[in-house]
Image (tube, rainbow, N blue to C red):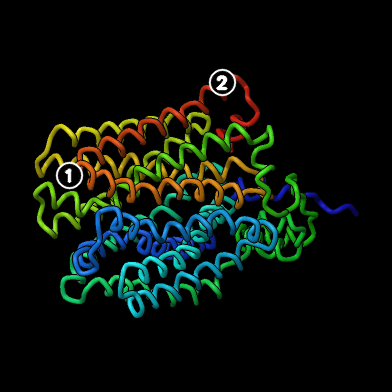
Amino acid sequence: MDRPEVDVHEELATAAVSPFHWRLGILITLITLFDGYDTFNPAYVIHYVAEPWGLAPGQAGFLVSSGLVGFLIGAIGHGAIADRFGRRGTFLAGLWIVNLFTVLTPLLADDFWSFCGLRVLTGLGLGVLLPLGTTFINELAPKRISNTFSLWGVTLGWSLGGMAAGLAGVFLTPSFGWQALYYVGALSIPVTLIAHRVLPESPKFLAAAGRTDELKTLLGRLRPERREFYQTATLRSPEATAGGFSLGVLLTPRYRRVSVTIWATAFLSLFAIFGLTGWIPTVMMQRGESFAASFGFGALMQAMSFVGGLTLATLADRNLRAAPLYLAAWWLVGGLAVIMLVFAGGHGLNLLIVAVAGFCIVGAQHVLNNFTAGSYDTGVRASGVGMMLGIGRIGAILGPFVAGLLQQATGGPQAVFWAIGGSAVVAAVAIGSLRATARDGSPSATAAVAP
């Protein structure tokens, strides 16, 4: 008797959201919480070390950017490992790298160069967590809610982490110094131990790698009502088998238009995000805000980024082909709002603009992550997301550094607002071009807007 044949991707795409989906979503939320926390806490270190370490604004900007250098290497380099050997082991290795150097930073960093060196090493692990967290969620979530589930499973944690960094900066650093930020960050170690026990391999990787027995067990946990059926079924995956990273694959006619556009958009978006978040406490103090209020602006931005990302994800899930248009609208509004800070001030306007920037600019980046994951097949998905975030991190590295140089050259933050707002506007134009291309029937654009 012939065994029934099952399309693995259809099984995952049409599944109801099970308790196992929720458990994995919560776990990845906790992991990305510490990712977001660790990414943004250097912005709250500047206030304490700029004078003792004799830092010029350009150096202070690099202090924020240094971890992103490691992130760039980790984000680009991990894809080859994750696509060939699996998501789970690569994810756990990234977590342990972050744990180790988070603990060592307050113990060993006593000047500019030692702090930056430890941040680069921490970034090697951080560069794994966000791309693979996004890949995991994209490969687990039912298709009809993939963007929304990604927001709850990845972005919520990252945003909460950014908020937690701001709160720790306000309430702990005045009494315990900047080192307290990293002792709190070491709480990621218990989460890592839980991940070792709970985190499975990605089902789409198992399918692409032909690991059928493991896949049947995992599918049974994701869709328990079909557990017995899977044991006698033949599993079929229409995508290519897993393989190593190749830049050439991402630049083939199938992906070229999408890849180049996404890379340019991510560069501009993350330049704006990290230029703004890296300097927001310092800039707001220059604009007359109190210490607590200035540090609180960072937490406000991260809180609004989740709301903005969730709103955008909901719209994108309702009309996948319109996702580039929605992304463009978000970046356009956010960029114009930041430019408004050049012409007007006051506490109320500062609050409003920071909230809009978080809602639009950072919120759109969260959706771009999942949009990118849905633009590539399983065999190159981790590489595609990693490459996007890696190139984006070049913009992230330059953002705080250029913002510092602009302040050093002009003596004020106005040039920073022009640079950050302008970058977001150009990002809107770039990603909006995919919508126009899709209407012309380009295969690469069609793949991206219909993940």
Question: Residue 113 — which label?
Answer: none
In this rendered view, identify the residue nearer to me: 358 or 249. Answer: 249
Q: Is residue 279 left or right of residue 87?
A: left
Residue 148 visible in the snapshot: yes
User: Which type of secondary structure does the marked residue at label 2 adopt?
Assistant: helix
In the image, is residue 408 above or below residue 59? above
Question: What is the crowding at mark 2: few (fewer than 14 residues within 10 Å), some, or many (at least 20)?
Answer: few
User: Which type of secondary structure does the marked residue at label 1 adopt?
Assistant: loop
In the rendered image, the quadrant that contains the N terminus is bottom right
Residue type indicated by callout 1: Gly
**x, y percentage for residue 32?**
43, 61
Residue type indicated by callout 2: Arg
**x, y percentage for residue 270?**
40, 45
Q: Residue furthest right?
A: 1
Labels 2 and 1: the sequence-earlier one = 1
Q: Quadrant of residue 203?
A: bottom right
In the image, is residue 272 above or below residue 31? above
In this rendered view, identify the residue nearer to me: 272 or 135. Answer: 272
**x, y percentage for residue 445?**
59, 30
Question: Number of callouts in the render?
Answer: 2
Question: What is the crowding at mark 1: few (fewer than 14 residues within 10 Å), some, or many (at least 20)?
Answer: few
Q: Is residue 227 left or right of residue 177?
A: right
Q: Residue furthest bottom?
A: 107
Residue at (70, 59) in percent of width and height: 84
Residue at (11, 42) in percent of width and height: 348
**x, y percentage for residue 229?**
73, 58
In the rendered image, the quadrant that contains the C terminus is top right
In the image, is residue 47 above or below residue 450? below
Residue 305 visible in the snapshot: no
Q: Which residue is mark 1?
A: 411
How far apart, in angstroms, are the residues tagged by discs 2 and 1?
46 Å
Q: Which residue is mark 2?
A: 439
